[in-house]
Amino acid sequence: MAQFMDLRAFILRARVLKFYRQALRITRRAPEHARDELRQTVRVEIEKNRHCDDKAKIRFLISEGLQRLKGLDEMLDMTGRS
């Protein structure tokens, strides 16, 4: 039987997927020799918390991940990667 989620869980899931896609887009800008490792790191971090049901923790993890992505994005900007 299918398990249905409430609206907040659905929206939170959408935010996680949006974050994941954004992270993968940013890894494309990394130097070629580091791309696979960055993609793998992103995937491992997402998978590590895949079964987390605590909405507050998920929001915290998204916030922390966005800060880390912003730092990576800025670093890639400084190296001239666009």
Image (cartoon, grey):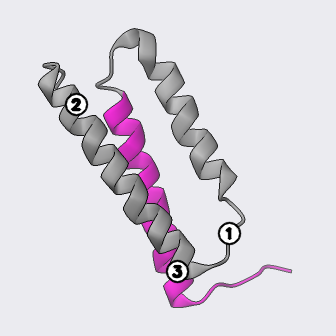
From the image, tell me which residue sits under label 3. Answer: 56
Q: What residue type is labelled 1?
A: Cys
Q: In this view, does 9 lie to the left or right of 19?
A: right
Whether residue 43 appears in this view of the structure is yes
Give the image location of residue 31, x and y in percent: 33, 14
Q: Residue at x 49, y 63 (%)?
A: 61
Quadrant location of the C terminus in the rendered image: top left
Q: What stretch is highlighted in magenta?
A: 1-27
Q: Are marks 3 and 2 in contact (CB under 8 Å)?
A: no
Specify which label sits upstream in the sequence, 1 or 2: 1
Quadrant position of the N terminus in the picture = bottom right
Residue 14 can be seen, yes or no: no
Label 3, residues with CA under 10 Å away: few <14, some 14-19, many ≥20: few
The residue identified by callout 1 is 52
Q: Give the residue pinned by disc 2.
A: 75
Q: Is residue 21 magenta?
A: yes
Amino acid type, callout 2: Met
